[in-house]
Amino acid sequence: MSTAIVLPQLPEWVQQHVKALYSAKTAETFNQAFDSFISQQASIRVNGQNVERDEYKKMIQGEITGDVGSDVTFNSVVSVPAKGGVDTIGTGSVGLSFKAIVYGRFFVFAERESSTVNSSLNVVVTDDIPRPHQIGRGGAFDGRRVTVLDEVLTDEANKIVPPTAGGASV
């Protein structure tokens, strides 16, 4: 007996992949998350500049290097399904804005160092990878990848305020 595996809808798919990038703890986990999200032939613009895929990968990985965790909050998500074609389920365009607070390994004044990434991300998701034909093997294969990415983002270190002597008298 087999059960049908339901792949996530387009907006959830993008959100899951963004969270996977920012929660990756190892280079291997990050590489897997990145490769399952961004197409090898993706067209990428960041802050109005064209960037190569490897350059974008290094930039995102640099935002989370040495982190011990992150909190990703999506402020808004808008999606439009792809038009036409036979298999357009889960493909189309997604625009979203998110904030990721990335926590570092070190403590300063009993607070963990952190930075905040604010992003407005617009992507086009297509079924980029053909499904393998495996006779007798079940399971779901998700060939969707981001083929066009346009992002405006900032990454700023959060200020750590030193504790005050509050209450000490001289």
Image (cartoon, helix red, strand yellow):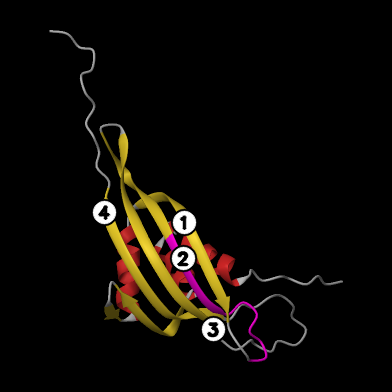
| Kind of residue at badge 2 | Leu
The answer to which of marks 4 and 2 sits earlier in the sequence is: 2
For label 1, the SS is strand
Where in the figure is residue 85, as x and y percent of width and height? 63, 92
* Disc number placed over residue 75 in the picture, else none: 1
User: Callout 3 environment at 10 Å: few (<14), some (14 to 19), or many (20+)?
Assistant: many
The answer to which of marks 3 and 1 sits earlier in the sequence is: 1
Q: How many marks?
A: 4
* Residue 14 seen in the current view: no
Q: Nearer the viewer, mark 4 or mark 1?
A: 1
Q: CA distance from mark 4 to mark 2?
A: 20 Å
| Kind of residue at badge 1 | Asn
Residue 87 lies in the magenta stretch: yes
Segment tinted magenta in the rendering: 85-97
The residue where tag 2 is placed is: 96
The answer to which of marks 3 and 2 sits earlier in the sequence is: 2
